[in-house]
Amino acid sequence: MTPRATYRMQFHKDFTFADAEAQVPYLAALGISHLYASPIATARSGSTHGYDVVDPTRINPELGGEAGFRRLVDRLKAHGMCMIVDIVPNHMGVAGGENGWWNDVLANGASSYYAQFFDIDWREPVLLPILGDPVSVAIAQGALSVELVDDVPMLVAYGEHRLPLRPEDHATAASDDLIALLDRQHYRLASWRTANDDLNWRRFFTINDLAGLRAEDPVVFEASHRLYLDLYAEGLIDGVRVDHVDGLTDPAGYCRTLRAHFDAITPAGADPAYIVVEKILAEGEPLATDWGIDGTSGYDFMAQITALLHDEDGAAPLAELWADISGRSAAFEPEDLRARQDMLSWQFEGQLGRCVAAFVALARSTPQGDGLTAGMIRRAVERMLWVFPVYRTYGTGIAAPAADAAIRTIVRERVATHLAPGEGPVVDLILDWLAGEGPGDPDLAAAAVRRFQQLSAPIVAKAVEDTAFYRYGRLLSRNDVGFDPAAFTLPIEAFHAAMAERAACWPRAMLASATHDHKRGEDVRARLAVLSEIPVRWRETVTGWVAAAAAIDDAVDPGDAYMLLQTLFGAWPEGLQIDDRAGLAAYAERIVGWQEKSLREAKLRSSWEAPDAAYEERCHALVRALLDPSRSTAFLRDLHELVEATAAAAQANALVQTALRYTVPGVADLYQGTELADLSLVDPDNRRPVDYACRARLLGHDAPAKLALIARLLATRADAPEIFAQGDYFPLDVTGSRAAHVLAFERRASEQTLRVAVALRCAAELLDQSGAAVPAAWWGETRLATGERAADLFVDGPVFVAVSD
């Protein structure tokens, strides 16, 4: 069954299949068609997210195991619903000694059956960067020992890591010299600090606990996907969401293989399996239409809908304000470049070095490579990665999709200013190889292109989203997964074009506005977007706040303080009063959690590798002082007044993004709990427990505006399924003095028509108002092409939705 509307749930030991089973009646009453589950395969014990899978062949017993999963699916089916699941083909969890495949590799080395399952350079032992000190120091400190674990001798490090020994060492392990024993193993222990430079196996981004899988190998694919194929064949799931598809060697080939496997077991006459991929699309980057997938999991829509809410007139004054306060660049591009440079030299040196070595070997296989030194190739690769406009290209070394050509052209144009004199031809040759048109040995070309493409993706992710986004603070609602902070807004015409393309090419793609990975909840972004419409008032207000923060502690960097102040405003909880000491204290601890991650991800004054405890504590103390009613009465009063003054405009934004998510082409996804105001911050804040009893109670009686709108639109989707599954998208012209504030469209199918209109960027008229409806007089004679007056459509709020025959 093709999903009509999904509900994402995060499973872990404290929220199991049984817990979800209890919420099925509520989801059914809400109008959900499919539960969308986080990874269900066996993950590392205690995993809070499930992406560190240690055994992909069985359902996680911590979640309830196979029996619990079947009970959940039975309950869903009894309510006319089904399941799609998140799968993780790119990597596995390898920490804690729970991964049998990895343990076999460590015990048996290159002769292990699983040796080719992982992306390991077998020219040297597997590097295990798990020590806090060099090996000799760790031994001297007694941190390493040989102990019996289930009657099998194992190497134990710090009482935590349990590592298998070669089978031939079992008999003498207890009496062997420890250094000599270690020298004989198929792995090499080292300090964790060596990982970035010396790691000889592919990891997920910079996480040493996650090892890359070679899903392109048919044997690996079969072993790591059999569970999901069997669940689908039995009718227990209707499809999958593929995690981090760009981490794979050949995403296109993988997706086609996955589709072929599902198609081979799809019953005659049944809908094909639903397959969406986690894929970050850059501004203007198309999604290939020949992968055999239904689209992405929705980050692209999240970027579009958020940008639509922002007013372009606020871009320049807010950039100037950021530069004035922080002393940093008003534009995002310098932060982007510096972060890429930092990440390449700090955290990806080993992967970069192996990529360069692969191109050096390729160059030496052809006369065209004569005269190219390793230094030239390194400079070219490095600088290309500084400016790469997308996560990756999709060449195989002997071919490349046509869409890659535009990306290569952009790279060549952007990299020119960074090259050493005379080294442009080196870039040209590498670009030829990425195009599948370069000279030399085809196998070496495939290896070099693979390494480049599997390096470019994590560079963008870690440098841009996990570094620069925490350094640049023009307006934090524009800094989220899949977003481009340099593109402040999305014009109505561009939104229409994107939705028409969705209707034509991706009618089954997922539509998301909140996820388990977002940096700010959808309603935090909606509230912050209001500031783009009132930059003058914001400057006047926040300037005093910056002074108040400096008066508490002027050693806190002004940029850090300004991002904190934006966050305090954006995430202010509904109903929190400034005399509620307990509520303010709880809010402060949430903010402190966000702040710690923000400071460490920015890597300017602290980091995960070397936390500056003193500076972090000053920042945390500032949070607590600002939210202490006995110390910051004036600030809290001003903050609360601005939250209240902008509440109607923020609610209007929230309702608009909700309405569009449920009416434009695609499958609407609802992240757990966000049917009420989503004022969450980056994980783990956005994965807090959900009060389903409260939501079920509100759904039945007095539902707040957002929940009521979701329920109404889900009912509309159920009543008119063909419009939402097959309907085209037709922009409606708007005329009149307020035409720039209305987005309207129709969708048609089976002689039915869906008409939608939403009011945009009306903050100036909604300030200090009690409701989200703009006064009728303000609309004047603004009309849709259908003749309907905006003043009549938006009487009760910023959303109009109707279906007619």
Image (tube, grey):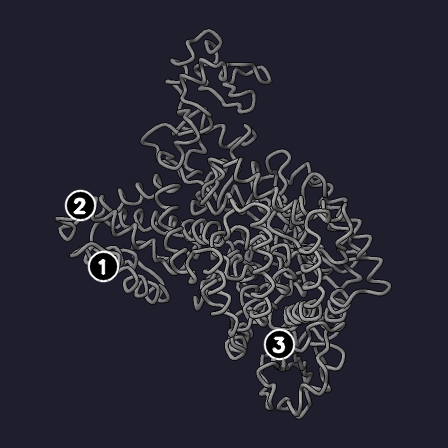
Viewport quadrant of the N terminus: bottom right
Amino acid type of the residue that numbered disc 3 sits on in the rendered structure: Leu
Residue shown at the point (38%, 58%) measured from the top left:
334
Identify the mark nearer the N-term, 1 or 3.
1
Q: Describe the element under mark 1 as helix, strand or loop.
A: helix
Q: Where residue 622 sits: x, y (%)? A: 61, 45
Indicate the secondary structure of the residue bearing disc 2: loop
Q: Residues within 10 Å of mark 2 (few under 14, many from 20)?
A: few
> Residue 428 got which mark?
1
The quadrant where residue 533 appears? bottom right
Which residue occupies the foreground of this view, 220 or 419? Answer: 419
Question: Dot 3, crowdedness within 10 Å: few (<14), some or many (≥20)?
Answer: many
Q: Residue furthest front?
A: 551
Q: Is residue 406 left or right of residue 644?
A: left
Quote the CA–CA distance across marks 2 and 3. Answer: 56 Å
379 over 541 or under it: above or below: above
